[in-house]
Image: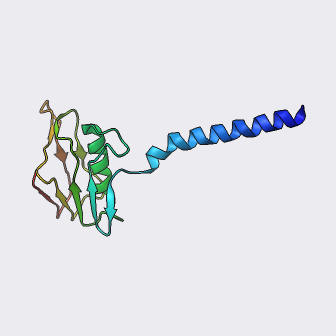
């Protein structure tokens, strides 16, 4: 009987660890790709679900990443970010001296008060193009 309960406890521990891993995994992995100074962002369908909020989160993370995305971030998503509630790109801490190439896509807030597509304050040396 003791061996039966020990076996059940091991199975329960494995199941709980697996569930914890699945819940924590999306928060540790970004959908943006690249490296060597240039990254692609906005393809939220990889991990995040593919809507405008996911694309905003993904691009903000890439713009904030000075290790892999130090020079340029390209928006390659398929979602047009139009009338986004809130601020899509909200002053990422490490967004300085970078190029953000939106490659002809729209990044726009919903125009109700203080909602913007891209908001920067106290940043310098950035180029935002093709938006």
Residue 6, by quadrant, is: top right
61 with respect to 125 (left or right):
right
Number of numbered callouts drawn: 0
Image spot of residue 63 (x, y percent): 28, 56
Q: Is residue 98 above or below residue 60?
A: below
Image spot of residue 30 (x, y percent): 38, 51
Q: Residue furthest right?
A: 1
25 with respect to 103 (left or right):
right
Residue 74, by quadrant, is: bottom left
Check the picture and name the quadrant holding the N terminus: top right
Q: Is residue 26 above or below residue 99?
A: above
Identity of the residue drawn at 56% across and 44% down = 21
Identity of the residue drawn at 17% across and 61% down = 126
Q: Residue furthest bottom?
A: 36
- The residue closer to the viewer here, 50 or 102, is 50
Identity of the residue drawn at 77% across and 34% down = 8
Identity of the residue drawn at 30% across and 59% down = 94
Q: Is residue 28 above or below residue 65?
A: above
48 with respect to 82 (left or right):
right
Image spot of residue 19 (x, y percent): 58, 38
Residue 26, by quadrant, is: top left
Q: Is residue 52 above or below residue 33?
A: above
């Amino acid at each position: 009987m003791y061996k039966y309960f020990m076996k059940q406890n091991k199975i329960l521990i494995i199941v709980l660890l697996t569930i914890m891993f699945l819940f924590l995994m999306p928060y540790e992995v970004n959908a943006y790709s690249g490296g060597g100074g240039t990254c692609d962002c906005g393809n939220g369908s990889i991990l995040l679900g593919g809507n405008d909020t996911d694309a905003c989160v993904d691009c903000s993370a890439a713009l904030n990443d000075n290790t892999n995305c130090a020079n340029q971030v390209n928006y390659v998503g398929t979602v047009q970010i139009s009338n986004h509630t809130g601020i899509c790109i909200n002053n990422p801490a490490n967004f300085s001296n970078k190029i953000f190439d939106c490659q002809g896509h729209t990044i726009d807030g919903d125009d109700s008060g203080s909602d913007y597509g891209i908001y920067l304050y106290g940043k310098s040396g950035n180029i935002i193009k093709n938006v």
